[in-house]
Image (tube, helix red, strand yellow):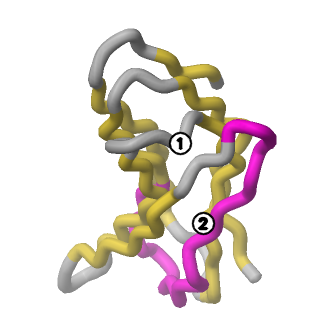
């Protein structure tokens, strides 16, 4: 996916899934984009369980030469937890490319 703007912009992309098996999971994104002053990009995972919503994030420091895989630290997820994984951007005029966003059990 290619994202670009001539002006400041906010952008997010995410997907929500229900966890089928209890275990340790890692969220990851393959990202390439402009790294300049004011670029804010984060990989996030929101986990909704019976009691609350827990948010895990990792800042992305873009590289515009090649794709880099960014990871969240492993998170233990329980069966039936509802999980939203995605990317948030708040940036000046830049370009970004997203190759893959994933949530995998380890």
Q: Residue 37 colored magenta?
A: no
Question: Quick check: marks 2 and 1 in contact, CB under 8 Å?
Answer: no
Task: Answer left or right for 16 relative to 103.
Answer: left
Q: Give the image quarter of residue 45.
A: bottom left
Q: Position of residue 15 (x, y in %)?
A: 48, 45
Q: Nearer the viewer, residue 51 or 71?
A: 71
The label nearer to you, 2 versus 1, is: 1
User: Which one is earlier in the sequence, the residue at label 2 or at label 1?
Assistant: 2
Give the Cα distance between marks 2 and 1.
22 Å
Residue 44 appears at what percent x and percent y? 43, 61
The residue singled out by tag 1 in the image is: 35
- The outermost residue toward the left is 51
Q: Which residue lies furthest to the front in this view?
A: 37
- Read off the residue under disc 2: 27
Q: Who's the residue at 45% across and 63% down the image? A: 59
**Which quadrant does the N terminus fall into?**
top right
Residue at 68% x, 37% y is: 64
For the record, the magenta segment spans 64-85
Determine the secondary structure under disc 1: loop
The image quarter containing residue 49 is: bottom left
Q: Does the stretch in magenta take in 74?
A: yes
């Amino acid at each position: 996916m290619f994202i670009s703007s001539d002006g400041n912009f906010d952008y997010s992309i995410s997907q929500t899934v229900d966890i089928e098996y209890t275990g340790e999971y890692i969220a990851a994104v393959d990202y390439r984009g402009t790294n300049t002053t004011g670029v804010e990009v984060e990989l996030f995972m929101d986990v909704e369980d019976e009691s609350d919503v827990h948010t895990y994030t990792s800042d992305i420091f873009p590289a515009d030469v090649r794709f880099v895989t960014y990871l969240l630290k492993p998170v233990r997820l329980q069966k039936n937890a509802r999980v939203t994984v995605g990317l948030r951007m708040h940036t000046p005029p830049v370009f970004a490319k997203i190759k893959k966003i994933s949530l995998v059990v380890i």
